[in-house]
Image (tube, rainbow, N blue to C red):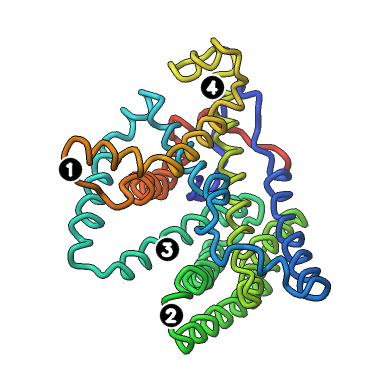
């Protein structure tokens, strides 16, 4: 969510709920907690926790149900359930859908799978870190050159950390070592750039946010280098996803709190489901159903009707499409002047 830089346009006085910057900063507490787990496991439990955890978060169904996919589904539901938003962005949505079909559909016939995977990985890392740096700029007040220096060094380091984790089983030992070395150099560069940027941050609260984003990447690199791959992905994933939900819930409460304005929230009101719970609950339920049963159900129908099957039609095809749309739409749906932005205000600076 909110992949663009946060600004402060005129906000509706009727907005009762606010996105709290102090709450968003508190999410980074996952970083020292994960480091504490690593140190306790390394020095007290002989790596028992590392051996118990899956080698990749993608191998753990519960992780996929709790992180990543739910907020992607939630962001798409937010757009699809409001005719006003669909009408405002329909040309962009149609153009992006066509691009995805051509590039990832037809392109997959010519571009190697690893190439497509790396492209998607780069976009994923950029999306996650652009959100956090965009939010931080509102309180750090960095000049543009300093902001983009921090952003691109963070993204570059994050990409190599991500590839080192998710491609480790397909990399030769020398290749894996090279990926780690590049990630290490870029992480050191991020620390240096942060020290350079300190002088431009006007407030202590801004310094906290600046260091929070830096240490998020640095800690992910350190945990990755110690082969705690699950924890390395958990830290940025949790911060990113809960940050996204804070925007979605704030929007829903401010728009539908007094009177439901679409069929989804009218149905929720009929069963007395709290407004703030509608999108999170629905997105988690849909994630579970799609991840656990989606592929089997689609293949059962295809086998019955057409005597054929499609490999991971839901978990790779549908959810992959929704993820790419999420990365794209979040770059503009929360921008100043967007119809969604009218229902967001901020507090806690």
Q: What is the number of callouts on the image?
A: 4
How far is the residue under mark 3 from the one under mark 1? 34 Å
Q: Which mark is residue 307?
A: 1
* Mark closer to the observer (3, 4): 3
Name the front one of labels 3 and 1. Answer: 1
Foreground mark, 2 or 3, reads: 2
Residue 53 percent coordinates (x, y): 63, 63
Question: What is the number of the mark on residue 255?
Answer: 4
Q: CA distance from mark 2 to mark 4?
A: 49 Å
Q: Residues within 10 Å of mark 3 (few under 14, many from 20)?
A: some
Task: Say what secondary structure mark 3 lies in.
Answer: helix
Query: What is the number of the mark on residue 183?
Result: none
Give the mark, 1 or 4, whose residue is nearer the N terminus.
4
Q: Which residue is at 71% across, 65% downward?
A: 49
Question: Disc 1 and disc 4: Cα gap in Å?
Answer: 47 Å
174 or 219, nearer to the observer? 174
- Between disc 2 and disc 1, whose residue precedes? 2
Residue 155 in the image, given as x and y percentages of width and height:
50, 67
Which is more foreground, mark 2 or mark 4?
A: 2
Compute the Cα span from label 2 to label 3.
16 Å
Q: Is residue 332 visible?
A: yes
Q: Which residue is mark 3?
A: 121
Closer to the camera, 23 or 276? 276
- The disc, 2 or 3, on the residue closer to the chain's N-terminal end is 3
Labels 3 and 4: the sequence-earlier one: 3
Query: For the residue labelled by badge 4, is the local secondary structure a helix, a strand or a loop?
Result: helix
Mark 4 surroundings: few (<14), some (14-19) or many (≥20) residues within 10 A: many
């Amino acid at each position: 969510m909110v992949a663009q830089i946060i600004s402060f346009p005129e906000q509706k006085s009727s907005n009762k709920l606010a996105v709290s910057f102090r709450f968003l900063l508190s999410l980074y507490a996952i970083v020292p907690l994960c480091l504490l787990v690593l140190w306790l496991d390394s020095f007290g439990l002989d790596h028992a926790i590392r051996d118990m955890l899956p080698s990749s978060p993608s191998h753990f169904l519960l992780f996929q149900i709790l992180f990543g996919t739910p907020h992607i589904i939630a962001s798409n539901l937010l757009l699809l359930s409001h005719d006003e938003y669909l009408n405002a962005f329909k040309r962009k949505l149609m153009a992006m859908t066509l691009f995805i079909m051509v590039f990832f559909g037809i392109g997959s016939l010519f571009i190697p799978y690893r190439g497509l995977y790396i492209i998607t990985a780069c976009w994923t890392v950029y999306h996650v870190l652009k959100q956090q740096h965009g939010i931080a700029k509102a309180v750090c007040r960095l000049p543009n050159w300093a902001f983009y220096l921090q952003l691109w060094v963070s993204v570059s380091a994050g990409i190599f950390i991500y590839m080192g984790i998710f491609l480790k089983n397909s990399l030769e030992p020398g290749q894996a070592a090279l990926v780690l070395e590049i990630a290490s150099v870029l992480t050191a560069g991020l620390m240096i750039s942060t020290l350079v940027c300190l002088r431009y941050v006007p407030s202590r609260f801004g310094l906290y946010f600046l260091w929070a984003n830096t240490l998020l990447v640095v800690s992910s690199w350190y945990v990755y280098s110690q082969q705690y791959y699950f924890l390395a992905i958990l830290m940025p994933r949790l911060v990113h996803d809960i940050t996204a939900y804070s925007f979605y819930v704030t929007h829903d409460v401010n728009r539908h709190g007094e009177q439901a304005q679409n069929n989804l929230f009218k149905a929720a009101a009929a069963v007395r489901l709290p407004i703030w719970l509608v999108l999170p609950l629905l997105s988690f339920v849909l994630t579970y159903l799609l991840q656990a049963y989606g592929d089997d159900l689609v293949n059962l129908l295809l086998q019955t009707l057409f005597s054929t099957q499609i490999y991971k039609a839901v978990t790779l095809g549908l959810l992959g499409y929704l993820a790419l749309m999420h990365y794209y739409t979040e770059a503009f749906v929360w921008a100043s002047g967007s119809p969604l932005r009218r229902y967001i205000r901020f507090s806690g600076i």
